[in-house]
Image: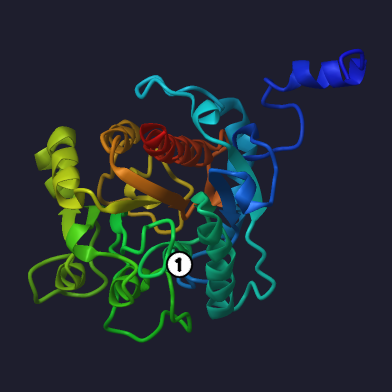
Amino acid sequence: MADDPIAAAKKSSESWYWWGIPTFFRCPWNEDPAAADIALVGVPHSTGNGSTERDQHLGPRAVRHQSGFYRRAHAIHNISPWDVAKVHDLGDVPLPEAMNNEACLRDIEAFYKRLDDAGTHPVSVGGDHSITGGILKAIAGPGRKISGGRPAALVHFDAHTDSYENMPHWLGAVRSAAHWAAYTVREDSVDSSRSLQIGIRGHPSKVIHTDKVGTASKGLGYQVITMAEFEDLGIQKTIEKIRARVGDAPVYVTFDLDCLDPSVAPGVANLEPGFGGMSIREATRILQGLAGLDVIGGDVVCLMPTKDNPNQITAQVAMVVMFEIINLVALRMKSRN
């Protein structure tokens, strides 16, 4: 009520990031997918990548704490996504069998199928990279509403291709962080002929007698832009390659924080310290260059808060990337209104 001093005080406090219950970007907490245009979701999952420390499940909470101060308009796109669309924090995907990767992937897919049924576009924070497989299975491909029944073009930022097919599982995880980029192509959730993997780098796990890193992905049909190739191309030509390949396809953006340089993002699961990665400025400029594409959703993965530095810079850059993806989805919605 207008004369309620507590209500007035709450209203006055809403702009302060340190006040209130943490949600992604201080968005309303509403677990009903049908109530939102864009759903912000945490996926606290760590059992898809058993070869690293398993603290990725703490990522969503860290980003919620950081993102309160970043509820802003976008200076480059000149929009406020919060005004363009109804953006809600839907909470975290419930994972009652958290130590069982296959059960978790089943539950992730079921959770996002509710979003697809409602036509609500997800922007998520993980969690290890296996979560992307479950999300894509729910929202892209034949019979899926959000993608219009089409497989998605994948714009995949990563130091690693995640397209293993030479082994049936990864320490017991079948739909693992190492396999998702392969099986989503095989199962018609991803259109590899429209997709790119960007920032790939690092020494291989064994001597390669083929044509360098990215062989499995190229065999699946992906275009692979290694970090060395990106450095030669530069930001603008990389954007041009992405836009030319994606065309009018529905686009899903997945961003593994290990594509960033370790000096920018030390708190990630699979550091590649021997090879320089992207700066956050390079990454955000590429993301901003995707404006106008049919971006249907995205995710940010592999944040490990327990390995972050004291000012939580990795959680902050995760927040920044999430903000960029939210704006890309909001721009798509604005153009269709």
Per the image, the residue denoted by label 1 is 130
Question: Label 1 is placed on what type of residue?
Answer: Ser
Residue that lies at the very extreme toward the front in this rendered image: 337
Left or right: where 5 falls relative to 197? right
Can residue 246 be seen here? The reply is yes
Assign the C terminus to one quadrant of the image: top left
Vertical arrangement, residue 214 with respect to residue 290, above or below: below
Query: Residue 267 at what x, y percent from top left?
Result: 49, 48
Query: Residue 305 at what x, y percent from top left?
Result: 57, 48
Report helix, strand or loop for mark 1.
loop
Residue that lies at the very extreme toward the bottom in this rendered image: 168
Tell me how the rendering is colored: rainbow
Query: Residue 163 at what x, y percent from top left?
Result: 29, 71
**As rendered, which of 275 and 171 lies closer to the eye?**
171
Left or right: where 184 falls relative to 237? right
Image quarter of residue 104? bottom right
Image quarter of residue 153? bottom left
**As rendered, which of 117 and 6 lies closer to the eye?**
117
Assign the N terminus to one quadrant of the image: top right
Residue in the picture at 22% in, 64% down: 192
Can residue 200 be seen here? The reply is no
Image quarter of residue 200? bottom left
**As rendered, which of 5 and 224 lies closer to the eye?**
5
Residue in the picture at 18% in, 35% down: 235
Query: Residue 101 at what x, y percent from top left?
Result: 54, 76
